[in-house]
Amino acid sequence: MSDVLLSIVILNYNTQEPLADCLRSLYDDPDHEQWQIIVVDNASADDSVAMVTRQFRQATLVVLDRNIGFAKANNRGAKIATGRHLLFLNADTVVLPGVITALSDFLERTADAAIVGPRLIYPDGRLQYSAHTFPGPLNTFLGYCLLGRLGARSPEGQHPQPVDYIAGACLMICREYFENVGGWCEDYFFYAEDADLCAQVKRVGGKTYYYGPRHIIHIGGTSAAQVALPAILEGHRSLFLFVHRQRGPFAFWATRLITIAALLLRIPLTALVLPVAVLLGRAQGVLSRLRKYIRVLGLCFSRNVFPTGDFLQ
């Protein structure tokens, strides 16, 4: 084991240009020589691998022969990481100078901190909701009542605060906690892995902190946008798995039934709106929502609602 304080694992999937911006921002940081930077490419079809090889030879590159999902790919990167802290970073982020060092220093000096993540902002300066309460029946109900942001609103203020979980777009964790819980749960393929990791760490006595004093830029949704409907379906699968794993069978069935009930209400209401949308020239958006609701409802009635990754392969 080397004396590297921090290893940064960046997962990439067909995001060549954002990845280049991300790596450039890391190597522009004056502290980058203290870091081990690892890029795990999840079988991208673009020129991501060639770009990293050509422009960022100092980075360690792991090239996978197929898309194995978020958790498995990040675990592959973690296996070769040597730092005391591990930072899992999305490829569509731009890290401002000093942020990573501030996060690492916070973990070093805060006894009960196991995980920390900064504020996330969009490129236009808007705040992203990056600190959340754990998913469950209540969150699902609020979400379908259009009140979901009540459970997803990032804390106010500029001081670090403990939260249930933070977004995996920029998540730093102490290696000992990461190894203690067995790394990312590979039962997930895409979505909810961050919630599960924070829940597992909480079980062994570690806290997750939202670090309000510093922020990074996160574009958001670049990989998921390439497969919009499949990503939505896989997201629901991951939600159901999390609730079953962390809250038990009763909460799982409650969440599933709430989702079914909400969709059985939304589908006919959306169908009623369709003729008006046609007259207003907005039929495409309404049809897209209707197809989404029908597909998610079909998933809820299927035999296996847990992640397999087949929607995104």
Image (tube, helix red, strand yellow):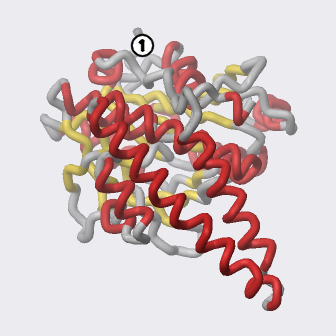
Please give the count of numbered marks on the rendered protein: 1
Task: Tell me what residue is drawn at x 77 percent, y 83 percent.
Answer: 275
Above or below, 183 against 97 in this view is above
Give the image quarter of residue 144: bottom left
Q: Residue furthest bottom?
A: 280
Task: Tell me what residue is drawn at x 31 percent, y 36 percent.
Answer: 198
Task: Tell me what residue is drawn at x 46 percent, y 43 percent.
Answer: 168
Q: Nearer the viewer, residue 144 or 223?
A: 144
Task: Residue 228: give x, y in percent of width and height.
Answer: 71, 52
**Is label 1 in a helix, a strand or a loop?**
loop
Q: Quadrant of the C terminus?
A: top right
Above or below, 7 against 288 in this view is above
Above or below, 161 against 14 in this view is below
Task: Residue 189: give x, y in percent of width and height.
Answer: 57, 30
**Residue to which mark 1 is pinned:** 2
Task: Residue 43: give x, y in percent of width and height.
Answer: 77, 27
Task: Tell me what residue is drawn at x 52 percent, y 74 percent.
Answer: 125
